[in-house]
Image (cartoon, rainbow, N blue to C red):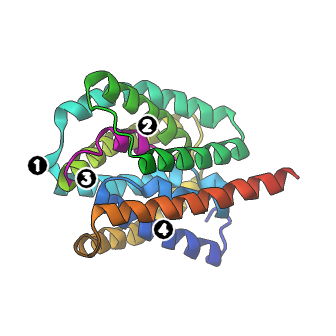
Amino acid sequence: MSGLTPAGFVVIAIAVLLAAALQASIGFGMGMLAAPVVALVDASLIPATLLFVALLVTSTTALIERRHLDLRGTGWAIVGRIPGSVAGAAMVAVLPQRALALMLAAVVLLGAGFTILGWAPRPVRPTLVLAGAASGLLGTATSIGGPPMALVWQGKSGPGLRGSMNGFGLFGGILSLALLTSSGSVSRGSWEVALALVPVSLLGLWLSRHVNHLLDARRLRGTVIGVSCFGALILIGQQLVGLA
């Protein structure tokens, strides 16, 4: 299974468990929380493994919150997502794993920085299309496509944010995986690890129902920012050491 050691799989499973709970609770965070950890353990699993796992979480959450899905806004975001995903698949095909890992870390830190600053662009048509394009490019190349859309939709209520983010993520995940598969960028090991993580993802979905009663969105967002930044900084340090 992708040459993973048992210890390595356990580390990834814990990260995916927490990330799945976070994704289902606030509508984003799967990539931001889990991707730096997965990249540290085995960079070859990025982005396909997490995209597959995220697909399970987003489809289930979108179904639960379907009444709160912003169809109009999601539609315009998808218009941008399509060309962005094509560009992201091309980047995966031509860039080395080290470059993708550094890009992943930079995306995490940039997204966290914007979130901390509280920047909130208006969810109008041009902004939605542009955010969808950025999400497609980053999500396909690094599995972290949530921050651009979360910035635009951060003013929504909890159910509205979860429904719209996961509805958009469901379409985007299918598109990204299809493009990566057609370009030969998805290894057998990625699928094997993703399938092994399905029970962990389902457990994370179940956990989110309890987390929602214990932590509000503000505390969850603070948690994902802190953990993601820590993981991104470790990932950058690892890559820099590898260059020495």
SS of the residue at dot 2? helix
- Please give the label number shown on residue 196: 4
The residue singled out by tag 2 in the image is 135
Q: CA distance from mark 1 to mark 4?
A: 31 Å
Name the quarter where the N terminus is drawn. bottom right
Q: Are marks 1 and 3 in contact (CB under 8 Å)?
A: no
The residue singled out by tag 1 in the image is 67
Q: CA distance from mark 3 to mark 4?
A: 25 Å
What crowding class fits label 1: few (fewer than 14 Cα within 10 Å), some (14-19), or many (20 or more)? few
Q: Nearer the viewer, residue 235 or 168?
A: 235
Q: Quadrant of residue 60?
A: bottom left
Residues rendered magenta in the picture:
143-157
SS of the residue at dot 1? helix
Q: Quadrant of residue 215?
A: bottom left
Inspect the magenta stretch and tell me whether residue 146 lies in it.
yes
Of the two numbered discs 3 and 2 on the same chain, state the one appearing first in sequence.
2
The residue singled out by tag 3 in the image is 162
Residue 230 rendering spot, x and y as whole percentages: 59, 62
